[in-house]
């Protein structure tokens, strides 16, 4: 499975961005897709996750109310709508997918995630 993220860029504080992540490959069997981010000098952290059927969603507390995760399962694509952006969300955003873990499970650092994509950089200036 290959994960391709896109949609990052540079915006001013208060602006919005929409990230996309598409999974490709033969025999795709994904239960959950998720976004993580890593800022310079910091550890990677969970942002949001959605089950393939979209009936389960989990957000990090820090993004609740400002970020919205959604998916188009038929296209194996996941989105992250980010509004009211602040400079502290500047990071490289990675998409991830797992065959078995649900949205809560994929958020736990103790669990190994099956697939990772290349990151897309989000930079928010003040």
Image (cartoon, rainbow, N blue to C red):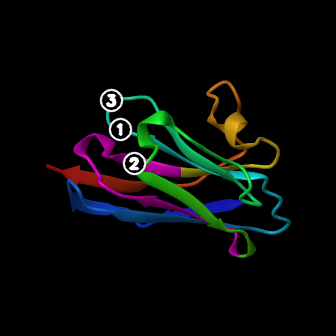
Is any atom of residue 119 visible in this view?
Answer: no
Find the residue positioned furthest to the left. Answer: 126
Is any atom of residue 4 visible in this view?
Answer: yes
Percent position of residue 81, x then y: 45, 61
Percent position of residue 115, x then y: 68, 49
Compared across the picture, whether 27 is left or right of 65 comes to: right
In whole angstroms, how far apart are the C-alphas of marks 1 and 2? 6 Å
Rendered residue at 44%/29% (across/down):
43
Q: Earlier in the sequence, mark 1 or mark 2?
A: 1
Q: Are marks 1 and 3 in contact (CB under 8 Å)?
A: yes
How packed is label 1: few (under 14 Cα within 10 Å), some, or many (20 or more)? some
Q: Which residues are magenta?
A: 75-94
Question: Between 71 and 94, which is closer to the camera in this rendering?
Answer: 71
Rendered residue at 81%/69% (across/down):
26
The mark tally for this picture is 3
Percent position of residue 85, x then y: 29, 52
Q: Quadrant of residue 54?
A: bottom right
Find the residue positioned furthest to the bottom. Answer: 75
Q: Which secondary structure lies at badge 1?
A: loop
In whole angstroms, how far apart are the C-alphas of marks 1 and 3? 6 Å
Residue 88 on the magenta segment:
yes
Q: Are marks 1 and 2 in contact (CB under 8 Å)?
A: yes
| Residue where numbered disc 1 is placed | 39
| Label number found at residue 92 | 2
| Residue where numbered disc 3 is placed | 41
Q: Which secondary structure lies at badge 3?
A: loop
Q: Earlier in the sequence, mark 2 or mark 3?
A: 3
Rendered residue at 51%/50% (across/down):
94
Find the residue positioned furthest to the front. Answer: 65
């Amino acid at each position: 499975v290959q994960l391709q993220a896109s949609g990052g860029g540079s915006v001013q504080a208060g602006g919005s961005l929409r990230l996309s992540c598409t999974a490709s490959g033969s025999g795709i069997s994904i239960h959950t897709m998720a976004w993580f981010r890593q800022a310079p000098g910091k550890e990677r952290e969970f942002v949001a996750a959605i089950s393939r059927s979209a009936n389960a969603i989990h957000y990090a507390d820090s993004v609740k109310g400002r970020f919205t995760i959604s998916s188009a399962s038929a296209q194996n694509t996941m989105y992250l709508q980010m509004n009211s952006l602040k400079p502290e969300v500047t990071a490289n955003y990675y998409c991830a997918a797992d065959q078995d873990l649900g949205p809560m499970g994929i958020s736990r650092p103790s669990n190994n995630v099956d697939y990772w994509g290349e990151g897309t950089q989000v930079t928010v200036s003040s």
